[in-house]
Image: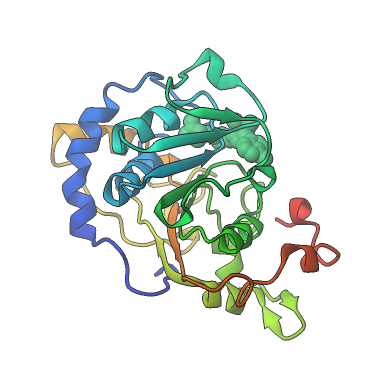
Amino acid sequence: MKTHTIGQSQWSRDDLLNALEEFSRIYENRPIQDNEGGMKAAQMFYAWFVAKSLQPKTIIESGIWYGQSTWMFEQAAPDADLFCIDPATYYKKGYTSGKAKYFKKDFTKIDWSHINPKTTFCFFDDHQNALQRMIHCAQLGFQHLMFEDNYPPGKGDCYSLKKAFHASETRTLLPGLAIRDYCENLIDVYQEFPPIISPEMNRWGEPWSTYDVDEPLTTEIQNEFQSIYAEESENYTWVNYVKLKEFEKNKHCIQLSDLKKKFDWSSMV
Ligand SMILES: C[S@@+](CC[C@H](N)C(=O)[O-])C[C@H]1O[C@@H](n2cnc3c(N)ncnc32)[C@H](O)[C@@H]1O
């Protein structure tokens, strides 16, 4: 079944396929061989691809774990300033970047007024509510976002945009304003990336086709370099790229404070 999309996909399947070899070579040199609990090739390829394509001036990474993704962003956009956020400091035992600025405070509590939101890429792998994150980004004028752990309804520990777009989501943000419609108003492009190669079972041991998912980029391993994608294919998480519309501050965007009473964001899954 096809996944939800909005607008014109930023990258074609050929763009993605053609980049698989380059990333696999870079990934061979990863500092952490088995990044259990964090991204593996199935998702990290896409985060690398988007950062490399955008070449943002600034990357904000929320959710560091042991630091493998920080290392990956350095490979993808070596000239970008890096701001890395995690309340925990596992990365101190893994990979620490000499150029990143580290924060323990939540993304929503940090003052971002000194950076240009239009040339910033915000990457979220922090298991927080993606809708809340997206509204906060819109308020600050950030436009390029990516969410890991973009799980289908009933799965995962946090609210995802995939859940927001699903037909089973009937909640409204304000009277008469469905979550789904509100998201469509804010978003210019929503591209959910396909699996690179599909395993028989998904990460929950269910048949691969249980949830809507696009055709994989490739159906068989054709080259030696592709084997890592097959080995780590179960890690697929419907990772997405979101480009928000340009907007005049506060015009199209609901104030999060107005929604405070209605939503307990952290318990919304
Ligand atoms: C799945 S791991 C991140 C994996 C990492 N991006 C990688 O690929 O290796 C999730 C991380 O989110 C962190 N986390 C939890 N709450 C957070 C928050 N509010 N802001 C940022 N990070 C948070 C956790 O401490 C954990 O390190």
In screen coordinates, is 2 left or right of 133?
left
Give the residue displayed 58% in from the left and 47% down from the top. 112
Above or below for 101 versus 16: above
Give percent across and percent down for residue 203.
50, 43
User: Considering depth in this image, is 28 or 97 the residue closer to the camera?
Assistant: 97
Give the residue displayed 42% in from the left and 25% down from the top. 99
Give percent across and percent down for residue 146.
46, 52
Asked whether residue 218 is in view, the answer is: no
Quadrant holding the N terminus: bottom left
Quadrant holding the C terminus: bottom right
Above or below for 21 versus 252: above
Outermost residue to the right: 261
Asked whether residue 21 is in view, the answer is: yes
Above or below for 30 versus 170: above
Q: Quadrant of ligand 1?
A: top right
User: Considering depth in this image, is 116 or 132 the residue closer to the camera?
Assistant: 116
Give percent across and percent down for residue 134.
58, 59
Q: Quadrant of residue 175?
A: bottom right
User: Considering depth in this image, is 103 or 227 the residue closer to the camera?
Assistant: 103
Give the residue displayed 30% in from the left and 64% down from the top. 10
Outermost residue to the front: 114
Outermost residue to the top: 93
User: Considering depth in this image, is 218 or 55 the residue closer to the camera?
Assistant: 55
In screen coordinates, is 178 left or right of 232?
right
Outermost residue to the left: 223
Q: How is the image coloured?
A: rainbow
Q: How many marks?
A: 0
Give the residue displayed 48% in from the left and 46% down from the top. 123
In screen coordinates, is 119 left or right of 22?
right
Give percent across and percent down for residue 76.
30, 37
